[in-house]
Amino acid sequence: MADWRRILNRRDDGFPRIMGVLNVTPDSFYADSRVNSLQDALSRAEQMVKDGADWLDIGGESTRPGAEPVNPEEELERVIPVVKAVRELLPEVGISIDTRRAMVARAAVELGADMINDVSALSDPDMLNVIIESNLPVCIMHMQGLPENMQNDPNYGDVITEVRQSLADVADILLESGVSANNIIADPGIGFGKQLHHNTTLLAAGRDIVPNTQMPLMWGVSRKRMFAHLLSREDASERLAGTLGIAAMAPTKGVDIIRVHDVREHADLYAAMRAVE
């Protein structure tokens, strides 16, 4: 397993760690991020690490707006061979398993996953047990509703306060179960049950949404639907520039990990910013 404690928080120079997205699904919203075979997954994983990824986030269920749930057995069949093969090929990279299901998380952890990325923030009652048993970090993300209905009509009174409180409620469950605060990563859930102004408000807030100062912050903004509304870029393939614009703000907002489809471009962005600073 990787030394995940070394790559959980942002770099000493203040720049976030880069997490590359490895979608083992046929219906991810960004077609170019989908992998169609084990060899394809390994090739992409190896390239992302060469390009500068500290983490790889492996997922077998699309949670784009309108997505239908995947059968648990099918999700296992998609991701477990990839986790196993990536762990063997790339022993130093951090592996995150992107799942809402405890059975998938447990199987991935047994094969060497270093983090659980739960977009449903413990909706599976057994997920807490997996986290306690594994003693691994967990990312808890805010989502209003479910992927199949979350964008129907999302509403908030004060989006920053409500997102922070929702994350705090889940974090308290983890803390009371003995999970340390620095092993709980907060994700505001950009695009998950939010309208454009909710997304931009949460991004501007940065670490204000994090309920505990010891908790790392993760952003997942890469090529999301918000850029269709913000920049009139309907096709996900046209959203890289907007994505990099938001990513350039991450160091000043205290972001520890940034989850992206385009690892090389983000690594180049931060290398250029670092050189000027």
Image (cartoon, rainbow, N blue to C red):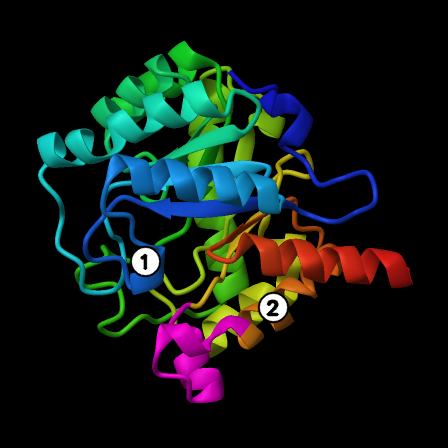
Q: Residue at x 42, y 27 (%)?
A: 173
The quadrant holding residue 75 is top left
Left or right: where 251 falls relative to 256: right
Q: Secondary structure at mark 1?
A: loop
Q: Amino acid at mark 1?
A: Gln
Q: Residue at x 55, y 64 (%)?
A: 202
Task: Please indicate, yes or no, whether residue 121 appears anywhere in the rendered image.
Answer: no
Residue with the mark numbered 1: 144
Q: Which mark is residue 244?
A: 2
Residue 196 x/y as whole percent: 44, 77
Q: Secondary structure at mark 2?
A: helix
Residue 80 x/y as whole percent: 26, 26
Q: Residue lying farthest right?
A: 277
The range drawn in magenta is: 224-240
Instruction: Compute the Cα span from label 2 to label 1.
Output: 26 Å
Mark 2 or 1, which is nearer the eye? 2
Residue 64 x/y as whole percent: 27, 60
Residue 232 belongs to magenta span: yes
